[in-house]
Image (cartoon, rainbow, N blue to C red):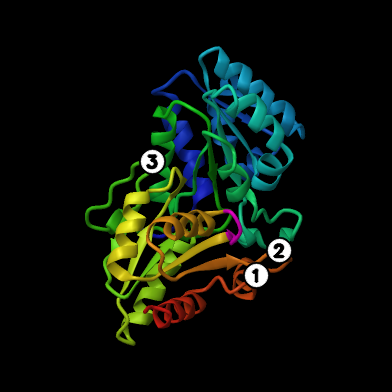
């Protein structure tokens, strides 16, 4: 596989392919099927697609009822609307009774671009991670998205998955030893001086930051932590002990998401420098995806700066 594809597009293709294998797979959308890329599922399996209109809370309730009857519903909307607006319904109607509903939040992070702050959800990781028993993940490219959707369909229980709007490079299919498993991070490149633990589109940037650092003699390990909850604690602590410094990177708030999860674990078990790279207690703003990412410092160059600082803090 080569080229670029948005993870939302890969998701749309995958659920159509999986529907033939599992007749219990149902898809619900909140009047955004053209954007969330569930439109092909709607066209192919109209009897298993439910457009709930701009009524996200009702959509989650309907999905809970379907799951209680043994079906496997995937609910879809923008991350801001489903993780934010429907938080209570996800918490009380899905997670509390531990129903098999998959919540899919498209257009996550600031790379949504021109839609601006109201649509750029940077809080979804923290919100969903706080819910007891909720699995939280964000694949990094189209190939990994395909693997993630297959794994989610087989997973029994509530889960939240974030999709990105913009097309990004596909690279995981060319990495030797790559294997996707829910709850298990993947070491994409080894290193001895610092570990970058990244999620979503920041994984690709972490690999580029590693190249920048290598030119300066700094050896950076890169871990793709596609599943934020449950966190792969064994892999994180191994990296902490072996490299002595960690930088987390996410296209989300640094409060409560991947950075929070890693910092909490390391502080309690293996105290070393941990720096968080992401959006720092700020709303998004309108602009092209590239311009907004640069404005918030979500670039390989500024990630490399964080790594240099982390290395300098080692005892």
Residue 1 appears in the figure: no
> Would you say 48 lies left or right of 216 here?
right
Q: Quadrant of the C terminus?
A: bottom left
Q: Secondary structure at mark 1?
A: helix
Q: Where are the magenta residues, as a range? A: 252-256
Is 278 part of what is drawn in magenta?
no
Residue tagged 1:
292
In 3D space, how far apart are the residues under numbered discs 2 and 3 (Cα atoms)? 29 Å
Q: Position of residue 22 (x, y in %)?
A: 42, 21
Circle 3 crowding by C-alpha within 10 Å: few under 14, some 14–19, many from 20:
many
Q: Is residue 253 magenta?
A: yes
- The numbered mark at residue 284 is 2
Looking at the picture, how far across and down is residue 139, in whole percent? 45, 50
Residue beneath disc 3: 182
Q: Residue at x 65, y 70 (%)?
A: 292
Q: Is residue 305 positioned above or below 120 on the image?
A: below
- Of pointers 2 and 1, the one earlier in the residue sequence: 2
Residue drawn 64% across the image and 61% down it: 110
Quadrant of res 92 = top right
Q: Residues within 10 Å of mark 2 (few under 14, many from 20)?
A: many
Q: Is 251 on the left-hand or right-hand side of 226?
A: right
Label 1 CA crowd tier, 10 Å (few <14, some 14–19, many 20+): many
Mark earlier in primary sequence (1, 3): 3
- Which residue ends up furthest to the left in the rendered image? 177
Q: CA distance from mark 1 to mark 3?
A: 30 Å
Q: Quadrant of residue 60?
A: top right
């Amino acid at each position: 596989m080569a080229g670029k594809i948005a993870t939302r597009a890969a998701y749309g293709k995958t659920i159509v392919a999986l529907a033939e294998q599992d007749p219990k797979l149902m898809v619900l959308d909140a009047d955004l099927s053209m954007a969330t890329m569930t439109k092909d599922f709607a066209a192919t399996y109209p009897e298993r697609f439910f457009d709930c209109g701009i009524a996200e809370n009702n959509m989650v309730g309907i999905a809970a009822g379907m799951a209680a009857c043994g079906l496997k519903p995937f609910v879809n909307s923008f991350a801001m609307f489903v993780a934010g607006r429907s938080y209570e319904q996800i918490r009380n109607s899905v997670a509390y009774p531990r129903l098999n509903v998959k919540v899919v939040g498209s257009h996550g992070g600031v790379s949504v671009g021109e839609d601006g702050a109201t649509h750029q959800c940077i809080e979804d990781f923290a919100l969903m991670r706080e819910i007891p028993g909720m699995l939280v993940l964000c694949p990094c490219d189209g190939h990994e998205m395909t693997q993630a959707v297959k794994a989610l369909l087989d997973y029994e229980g509530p889960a939240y998955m974030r999709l990105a709007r913009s097309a990004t490079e596909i690279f995981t299919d060319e990495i030797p030893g790559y294997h996707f498993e829910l709850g298990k991070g993947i070491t994409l490149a080894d290193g001895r001086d610092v570990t970058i633990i990244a999620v979503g589109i920041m994984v690709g940037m972490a690999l580029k930051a590693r190249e920048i650092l290598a030119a300066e003699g700094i050896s950076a390990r890169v871990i793709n932590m596609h599943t934020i909850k449950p966190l792969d604690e064994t892999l994180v602590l191994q990296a902490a002990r072996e490299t002595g410094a960690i930088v987390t990177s996410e296209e989300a708030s640094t409060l409560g998401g991947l950075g929070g999860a890693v910092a909490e674990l390391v502080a309690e078990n293996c105290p070393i420098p941990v720096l968080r790279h992401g959006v720092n207690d700020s709303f998004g703003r309108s602009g092209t995806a590239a311009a907004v990412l640069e404005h918030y410092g979500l670039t390989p160059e500024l990630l490399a700066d964080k790594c240099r600082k982390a290395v300098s803090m080692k005892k």
